[in-house]
Image (cartoon, rainbow, N blue to C red):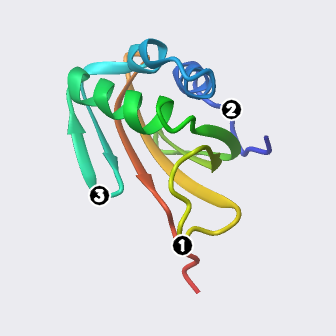
Amino acid sequence: MSDTTTLLPVLAEHVRAVNAFDTDAILATFADDAFVNDARREFRGAEAIRRWAAKELVGDKVTLDVTEVVDHYGDQIVRARYDGEYDKTNLPGELIMTNYFTVCDSKITSLIVIRNQPAY
C-alpha cells in the first residue's frame, strides 16, 4: 500500500472486514444511519447496508488492495484495486475504484464508491 496518509482505524478495520468476507464486521464499521452509494444506487441504514455487503461484497468475494489514501478536509479518499467473483464484463483487467468515506465518532457515516476515469 502506498499512501499519502494513514487509513483511519475504522477504515483499516473496514478493509480488513471486507477482505475477510465478514458481513457482521463490515456492518460494525458503519453508523446505524449511514448510507452507501455504490454504482449510483443508494443504500440507507443498517439493514440496507447489511444486504448490500452480504450480496455484493461477501457474496461476490470482493477484495480490496488499497493503493492510495488521501485526507481531504477530514474525509478520506481511498483508492483500491478491486478483485473478486463479480461480473467483470467490460471492466479493465485492473479495476481501481475510488471510495469517498466520511467518518464521525469512529464510524463510517457515508461511503461513495466510484470508478473514476482520467480527467484528460
Residue type highlighted by circle 2 = Thr
Query: Is 105 positioned to the left or the right of 118 in the image?
Result: left
Query: What residue sits right under mark 3 in the picture?
Result: 40
Q: CA distance from mark 2 to mark 1?
A: 32 Å
Screen quadrant of the N terminus: top right
What residue is shown at x 30% (from left), y 19% (from top)?
31
Query: Is 31 positioned to the left or the right of 117 in the image?
Result: left
Q: CA distance from mark 3 to mark 1?
A: 17 Å
Query: Is 45 positioned to the left or the right of 119 in the image?
Result: left
Q: Give the residue furthest to the bottom.
A: 120
Residue type highlighted by circle 3 = Arg
Q: CA distance from mark 2 to mark 3?
A: 27 Å
Q: Residues within 10 Å of mark 2 (few under 14, many from 20)?
A: some
Residue type highlighted by circle 1 = Asn
Between 112 and 102, the one nearer to me in the picture: 112
Query: What residue sits right under mark 2 in the picture?
Result: 6
- Under circle 3, the secondary element is loop
What residue is shown at x 49% (from left), y 29% (from top)?
58
Query: What residue sits right under mark 1 in the picture?
Result: 90
Query: Eyeballing the image, is 59 above or below 105?
Result: below
Q: Nearer the viewer, mark 2 or mark 1?
A: 1
| First reached walking from the N terminus: tag 3 or tag 1 | 3
